[in-house]
Image: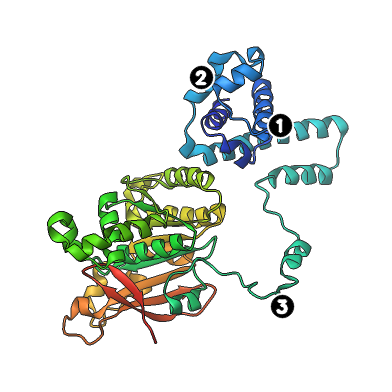
Amino acid sequence: MTVEKALLGCMLKENFYISDSVIRTEHFEDPRHQALYREMRILHEKGMSIDVITLSTTVDLEPFGGISYLYDLQSYANQEKFDEYELILLDQWKEREKRNILTLAKEEDWGIHQVIQALNIIDEARIDDHLSIMTALSEIYEAPWEEGKQIKGIPTGIKRLDQMTNGFQAGELTVVAARPSMGKTDVMLHFAKEAGWNNYLPIIFSLEMPYQSLVQRLIASTGGINRIKLRNPYAGLSLEQKDYWAEIIGSLSKTNIQIFDGARQTIAEIRAKIRKLIHQFPEQKPIIMIDYLTLIRPEENYGGNIHLQVTEISRQLKMLAKEMNCPVLLLAQLNRAVEQRQNKRPLMSDIRESGSVEQDADVIIFLYRDTYYDKTSDQKQLEMIISKNRNGPVGTVLANYNEFTGKIEDVVD
């Protein structure tokens, strides 16, 4: 019954789980938990806040064990593992149902076909992902006659990149990979600003860089200010830059960027924080950005096997994009093999533990600057090399990049 307590405890602490959860009353085994969950849903549907106080004043708690039992339930809550608890509870319910079916089949002398059919129905019970072809076709039926019906993703701010990828798409995992100091974080922040200014909700998980550094980079790139000056804005900024300061801050505040800078977070922790923000900002569709792959903490150690750890994380990130129905942008480091080649433009095999990442990602973009290796090069622009694009073409997109301010700009033809 511990998992039942944990689920109810999570719902008491964060009410949005009540409407979000796929759990039904009959999935609980303990009659007290069934009754309590039923009462919580009724109150939640009425728009009431659900906590120990409201339950104690609106519901007779004696059948549930009194107010002390509610506090006991809360002690089991761990929101980061809510999805895991749901799956465990569903599995437990399935096992009980299977036993009930086998008992009933024996009592009523069912045929083998009837038993198998009943067991299959239980096995297939899961989150509702059913859609009939009629429903799907009805959604697109009027498309040829309706202007602007094309499904566009979140814009990148780079016109040619948008043309090739159609922007960041819901349910897709995009990997941006490069060697250190090539501009990965600045590119991510550029995408975050563009998403925010277009009324999406950029959620950044910075697993290496503290939020203060990200904010400085955002200010520098938005205002075209050399980052060195922001170490001491009072002494470093010119009078003109100080006059422009309030405008920069105002412009950035409109992006509504959300930053989490805790180190070594797991996907479960990331998922819980995203879910909370989605309910906090219901009008804005999120885009999730993570800096970077190998700093994510796996759920299991796998005996220190990095390949297995990355495989787990990569798979979970793709699942996260689908579950949350939003784009996930993941930064990744390239291994040193690229440095040994004469042509140092990255290849798919240069991604650390590349196999699973290459398989799970919908889009893979490599960043390359010729001037990083050759200061005298005539090619001054940042190359965004689209090496994988599940639903579009591959190729190279150019952008102007100022390494001192971190500003990314589209190349005007």
Three-letter code for the amino acid on which mark 3 is drawn: Pro
Mark linked to residue 71: 2
Question: Residue at position x 64%, y 41% from top?
Answer: 22
Q: Secondary structure at mark 1?
A: helix
Q: Is residue 58 depicted above or below 25 in this figure? A: above
Three-letter code for the amino acid on which mark 1 is drawn: Glu
Q: CA distance from mark 3 to mark 2?
A: 57 Å
Q: Is residue 341 depicted above or below 184 in this figure? A: below
Q: Secondary structure at mark 2?
A: helix
At which x and y percent is residue 13? 51, 30
Residue underneath mark 1: 26
Q: Secondary structure at mark 3?
A: helix
- Disc 3 to disc 1: CB gap under 8 Å: no
**Quadrant location of the N terminus?**
top right
Q: CA distance from mark 2 to mark 1?
A: 23 Å
Task: Give the mark nearer the N terminus: 2 vs 1.
Answer: 1
How packed mark 1 is, by other alpha carbons closer than 10 Å (few <14, some 14-19, many 20 or more), is some
The colour scheme of the drawn protein is rainbow
Residue underneath mark 3: 144
